[in-house]
C-alpha cells in the first residue's frame, strides 16, 4: 500500500518563486480543481491520499515534493534552495514522523526533493540552482547503512533534475537530453521527449502507470506507443508556477 502526501494550493500561489518562467496570472480556483483531480488520480491508482491544509503565507507550499525524500528506511527532510521555501518543511516533517525516522539536511547543504531521482538503490541528485554538492554528501551519510549509491548529476537549463529525467516504467526513464547528460543513465532504457516539448520529461510513476500532463501530446504518444499506461491530468496552473506532476505529492510505501 502506498501513501501520497499532498497539500492544498495556497491562495498566494501567484507570488511563487520563478526561475525560468515569466510570471503569468494563475487562476487559483482552477488550480484547486486541477489539484483535486490530481488527488483523485492518485486515489484511482490505489494510493491513500493524505492532504495537508493550505499554508496561505507560503506560495509554493503545494509543491511538497521539494520538502522531503521518503525512502523505505528513512525520511530525509530537505533544506530547500529557495530561502522563501525553508519554512515549508516543518509541517511535512510532522506529517512524516508517524511513518519514518527522520534525518534533516543542514547548512551548508541545500536540497530540493525535485532534484532527487530514486531508481531502486540508485539515488541521483541534481546539482542545480537549488541543490548543491554538500547535500549529496549528507544524503550519502544518511543512507550509508541501507545500500544506496548516491551520485550528483549536473543539471543545466531547467529548475530540477526531475524537470529533465523521471521514471516511466520499471527500467525506463523519460529524458530531455538538452538538460542532462543521458549517458549517466545508460543502464536504463531511455525515451526522449519530443524536442518541441522540452518540459515533458516530468512524469509520476506509480503502480505501473504514470500520471502525466495533458499539455505534452506528442511525448504522450511516444510513451503510449512504448506500452506505457498514461493517466492524464490537466496541470496548467501549477505549470505556470514552474511546477509539474511529481512535485505535488510525496509518495511512499506504508509500513505498518
Ligand atoms: C519553485 O520555484 O520552487 C516553485 N515555484 C516550483 C517548484 C516545483 N517543484 C518541483 O518541480 N519539484
Image: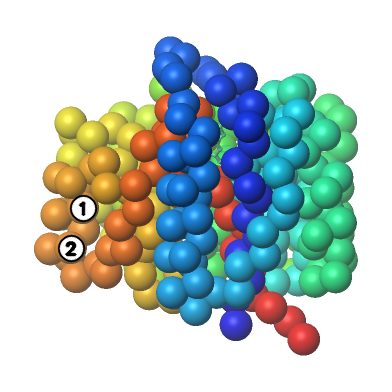
Q: Nearer the viewer, residue 128 or 137?
A: 128
The picture quadrant where one finds residue 128 is top right
Instruction: State the quadrant of the C terminus.
Output: bottom right
Label 2 sits on residue? 224
Can residue 109 be spotted in the picture? no
Relative vertical location of residue 41 with respect to residue 12 in this rendering, above or below: below
Q: Give how far across and how far down residue 138 sits, in percent.
A: 79, 45
Q: Position of residue 250 (x, y in %)?
A: 62, 57
Q: Is residue 19 left or right of residue 198?
A: right
* Ligand 1 quadrant in view: top right
Judging depth in this view, the residue of 203 and 73 nearest the camera is 203
From this viewpoint, is residue 87 visible? yes
Image quadrant where one finds the N terminus? bottom right
- Residue sitting at 26 percent across and 41 percent down? 215
Relative to residue 205, is residue 57 drawn left or right? right
Q: Which mark is residue 220?
A: 1
Q: Residue at x 51, y 61 (%)?
A: 39
Q: Position of residue 74 (x, y in %)?
A: 78, 65
Q: Look at the numbered disc 1 and give the secondary structure of its residue.
A: helix
Q: Quadrant of residue 216?
A: top left
In percent of width and height, residue 99 lies at: 80, 71
201 left or right of 12 in image: left
Residue at coordinates 80% horizontally, 60% vertically from top-left?
95
Q: Residue at x 54, y 68 (%)?
A: 120
Location of residue 194 with respect to 159 vertically, above or below: below
Q: Which residue is farthest bottom?
A: 256
The answer to whether 236 is drawn above or below residue 34 in the figure is above
Residue in front for this viewpoint, 206 or 16: 16
Number of on-image labels: 2
Disc 2: CA contacts within 10 A as few (<14), some (14-19) or many (>=20): few
Q: Secondary structure at mark 2?
A: helix
Amino acid at each position: 500500500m502506498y501513501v501520497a502526501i499532498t497539500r492544498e494550493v495556497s491562495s498566494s500561489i501567484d507570488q511563487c518563486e520563478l526561475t525560468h518562467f515569466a510570471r503569468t496570472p494563475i487562476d487559483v480556483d482552477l488550480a484547486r480543481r486541477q489539484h483535486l483531480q490530481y488527488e483523485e488520480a492518485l486515489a484511482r491508482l490505489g494510493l491513500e491520499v493524505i492532504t495537508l491544509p493550505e499554508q496561505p503565507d507560503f506560495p509554493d507550499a503545494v509543491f511538497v515534493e521539494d520538502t522531503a525524500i521518503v525512502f523505505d528506511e528513512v525520511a530525509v527532510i530537505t533544506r530547500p534552495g529557495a530561502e522563501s521555501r525553508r519554512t515549508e518543511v516543518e509541517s511535512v516533517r510532522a506529517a512524516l514522523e508517524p511513518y519514518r525516522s527522520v534525518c534533516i539536511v543542514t547548512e551548508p547543504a541545500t536540497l530540493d526533493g525535485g532534484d532527487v531521482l530514486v531508481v531502486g538503490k540508485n539515488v541521483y541528485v541534481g546539482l542545480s540552482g537549488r541543490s548543491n554538492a554538500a547535500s549529496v554528501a549528507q544524503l550519502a551519510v544518511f543512507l550509508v547503512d541501507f545500500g544506496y549509491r548516491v551520485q550528483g548529476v549536473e543539471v543545466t537549463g531547467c529548475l530540477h533534475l526531475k524537470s529533465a529525467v523521471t521514471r516511466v516504467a520499471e527500467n525506463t526513464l523519460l529524458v530531455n537530453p538538452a538538460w542532462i547528460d543521458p549517458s549517466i543513465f545508460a543502464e536504463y532504457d531511455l525515451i526522449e521527449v519530443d524536442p518541441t516539448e522540452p518540459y515533458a520529461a516530468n512524469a509520476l510513476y506509480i503502480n505501473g502507470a504514470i500520471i502525466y500532463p495533458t499539455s505534452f501530446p506528442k511525448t504522450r504518444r511516444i510513451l503510449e506507443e512504448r506500452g506505457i499506461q498514461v493517466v492524464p491530468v490537466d496541470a496548467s496552473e501549477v505549470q505556470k508556477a514552474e511546477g509539474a506532476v511529481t512535485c505535488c505529492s510525496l509518495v511512499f510505501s506504508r509500513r505498518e
